[in-house]
Image: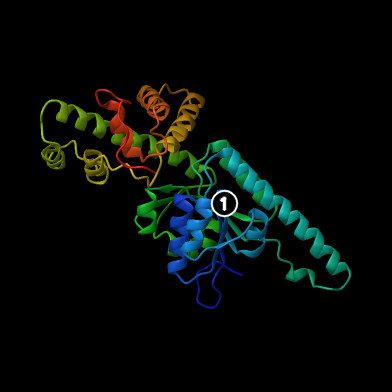
Amino acid sequence: MGTNGGDAQQPVIGIAGLGFVGRALAARAREQGWSVMGCDPHAPAATLASSIGVQVLPGVAPVAAACDVLLVCVLDDPQLAAVIDAIVEAAAGAAAEVAAEALAGAVPAALASHGPGLVVNAVTCSPAAADRTVAQLRACGVDCVEMPMSGSSAQIAQGQALGLVGAEAAVWDRHRACLQRIVPRLMHVGPPGAAARAKLASNLVLGLNRSALAEGLALATALGLDGEDFLQLLRESPAYSRAVDVAGPRMLARDFTPVSRLSQHRKDLRLILEAGEAAGLALPLAHAQAQLLERAVAAGLGELDNVAVIDALRPGFGAHAPRSAP
């Protein structure tokens, strides 16, 4: 089945990893009227996905066998590797089974289906993991598009997040229409591997913007200024960034209900620092932010939203419980 988004044949969407990003992309696909199936080893995530119409299956192999497009939305390099290994193993097993049936005259080899025609890597991963993923899938004859998302799960669900695309031009042309129905805002940043690299660089800027806002708010309020007034000042000044509107009010209200997790950005920072080291860059601001987030996670803020970074800057940090639970 094709994935060009036409009306004749609607793709079946599979999702490996039903956390915040996976569920948001599932909701987008369901809005198109498409069938969505997925898997996640964590029962609460699977239950939440089931509640929005996702057919939950017991693992990657059955999802891959039944879908046309498989979105991989797991956390990190090891989880990505495990999913891709499962896809490759399932594809090899299916190919052997169909070849045997074809030799026996039971099924024409031309009708063989070895799993998804497209795998979308939506993981914020290392460049090496992204390159390895593309190579493994290419060897199986499966198209791969990198599409890490820049934006929170709420922004993804609203169609406002930006998908960074790394893919060969022909592969991108083949699948663009389908993916754009799930993620309206897409930017093709280059060949395979480019999106992983772009996501790390953009996440560095995003995280530093958020931490700079948190530090400025902490200073302003510690000096006796009204927080809301200070946010308005920022909106009218050259210091403005989107973080003022997206994160500022939540920081002031100490609304740390997660739409992304602080611990996950700490993971991204580790990848950023590794990439910087490989490129011969010191990245002193990234190191300072990483130290701040390590302290925040050690103090119990890791499962809260990224805006909770402001609590790591307050006097008596760690002495009070956060207002909003995960």
| 132 sits to left or right of 214 | right
- Is residue 48 among the parts visible in the rendering? yes
- Seen at 36% across and 25% down, the residue is 292
* Circle 1 crowding by C-alpha within 10 Å: few under 14, some 14–19, many from 20: many
- Is residue 161 among the parts visible in the rendering? no
| 210 sits to left or right of 101 | left
Quarter of the image with the C terminus is top left
Rendering quarter of residue 244 = top left
What kind of element bears circle 1? Answer: loop
| 161 and 35: which is toward the camera | 35
The residue indicated by pointer 1 is 40
Residue 77 against residue 150 in the figure, above or below: above
| 6 and 221: which is toward the camera | 221
Q: Position of residue 195 (x, y in %)?
A: 48, 44
| 38 and 172: which is toward the camera | 38
Q: Residue furthest front?
A: 320
Quarter of the image with the N terminus is bottom right
Rendering quarter of residue 218 = top left
| 304 sits to left or right of 89 | left
> Please, which colouring scheme is shown?
rainbow
Report the number of numbered marks: 1
| 16 sits to left or right of 109 | left
- Seen at 26% across and 46% down, the residue is 246
- Seen at 43% across and 62% down, the residue is 28
- Seen at 49% across and 30% down, the residue is 275
- The amino acid marked with disc number 1 is Asp
Q: Position of residue 26 (x, y in %)?
A: 48, 60
Residue 268 against residue 144 in the figure, above or below: above
Residue 305 against residue 274 in the figure, above or below: below
